[in-house]
Image (cartoon, rainbow, N blue to C red):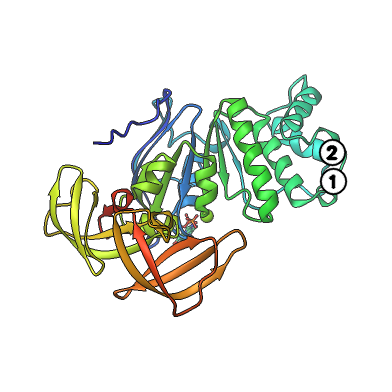
Amino acid sequence: MEKRTEPALSPLLLAMRGVVKTFGRSTAVDGIDLDVPERAFLTLLGPSGCGKTTVLRMIAGFETPDSGDMRLDNTPLVDVPPERRPVNTVFQSYALFPHLTVNENVAFSLKLRGGVPDMAARVRRALDAVHMADFGDRYPHQLSGGQQQRVAVARAIIAEPRLLLLDEPLSALDRKMRGHLQIELKALQRRLGIAFVYVTHDQEEAFALSDVVVVMNKGRIAQKADPQTIYSRPADSFVADFIGNSTLVKGQVRERHGDMATIETPLGNVTAPVADGLAAGDPAVLVIRPELLSVHGEGTTTLIGTVGNCVFQGERSMIEADVAGVALRFAAEAPYSIGSSVPLWLDAGRSFITRVAT
Ligand SMILES: Nc1ncnc2c1ncn2[C@@H]1O[C@H](COP(=O)(O)OP(=O)(O)O)[C@@H](O)[C@H]1O
Ligand SMILES: [Mg+2]
């Protein structure tokens, strides 16, 4: 039996319990429990509208929960006004003041607090941290998108918050810049040693950055785990579908033995690791990640597919092959022609049987 251990946790910084937020008749956040340890990089991941921003806004104090409990350092948070919370936010839009220089933008949050004697040195340190120290005299319109977002991060860290909230901070940037800034943000978070709660709808970004990924679906938490667990053992079919290119095959659990079960599917009976709580007779989904299908004879279960689609992606091609009405997705080095027959080996022991999302 594979033992799954939680990452070693630092003391708890933020705890949310049973938090609900409605707007009129719609429930944006539907009873979530969330723990943010000190120094953690935690990411809220989910499709647009699932409640990610609302969670951040409640932590920042811009929204008040309808019910539930929120604590920072075990002290109730709900009655603390936003400006007294040791929390700062970086938004998707850079939100810099256009008529202030970079230095003035970064100094702004300290000025709001009445200023500090070593202001210039602190501005310089904050800009240094994001590699922008040479740009202090420029105005926002003289900077690229990536540079503006670096300044926004400097402005958010200068008051030394305990917790930094980032709401899709890189989503307006092109792919290459996003990659650079992901690496910088992760390094910055380690260096500063403060907790980040990061929001994204991009699963690659969530995996690249996070200690803990929290997948949200319709205002609820679908799964909370380290990236590897989310990837290889998705808690339900929603998570499995959202996080990758996996093929989801519907079926029914035939029998279960400890951590393994046999599922009856249109592909035949497949024996694989199974999610907790699933028992014989339950409807379930077999999750087949693309890398578990091989055209080179590696694996336990042999299938014959008919190529229905082939997308050339450069270093590899993504192929969809039909087996018994199931479109199996996998990668191959060479493209295949549509309609050709392809033998496929499935590494069933690394696939996963999970529950059907509600
Ligand atoms: N101020 C608001 N008034 C009314 N509805 C809102 C408000 N803020 C968010 N919502 C609704 O709550 C749900 C969750 O929104 P949000 O937290 O912004 O999701 P996400 O950030 O995951 O895209 C959505 O259905 C959205 O329309
Ligand atoms: Mg949002």
Residue 246: horizontal and vertical position, in percent? 40, 59
Image-based side of 169 in relation to 268, left or right: right
Frontmost of labels 2 and 1 is 2
Viewer-proximal residue among 110 and 195: 195
Q: Residue furthest top?
A: 117
Disc 2 from disc 1: Cα separation: 9 Å
Which numbered tag is attached to residue 325?
Answer: none
**Amino acid type, callout 1:** Tyr
Residue 20: horizontal and vertical position, in percent? 35, 49
Query: In the rendered view of the protein, which quadrant contains the C terminus?
Result: bottom left
Question: Of helix, strand and loop, which one carries label 1?
Answer: loop
Question: Disc 1 beta carbon < 8 A from ligand 2?
Answer: no
Q: Is residue 116 visible?
A: yes
Image-based side of 62 in relation to 288, left or right: right
Query: In the rendered view of the protein, which quadrant contains the N terminus?
Result: top left
Residue 294: horizontal and vertical position, in percent? 41, 58
Which numbered tag is attached to residue 139?
Answer: 1
Question: Which residue carries the number 2 mark?
Answer: 135
- Quarter of the rendering containing residue 125: top right
**Amino acid type, callout 2:** Phe
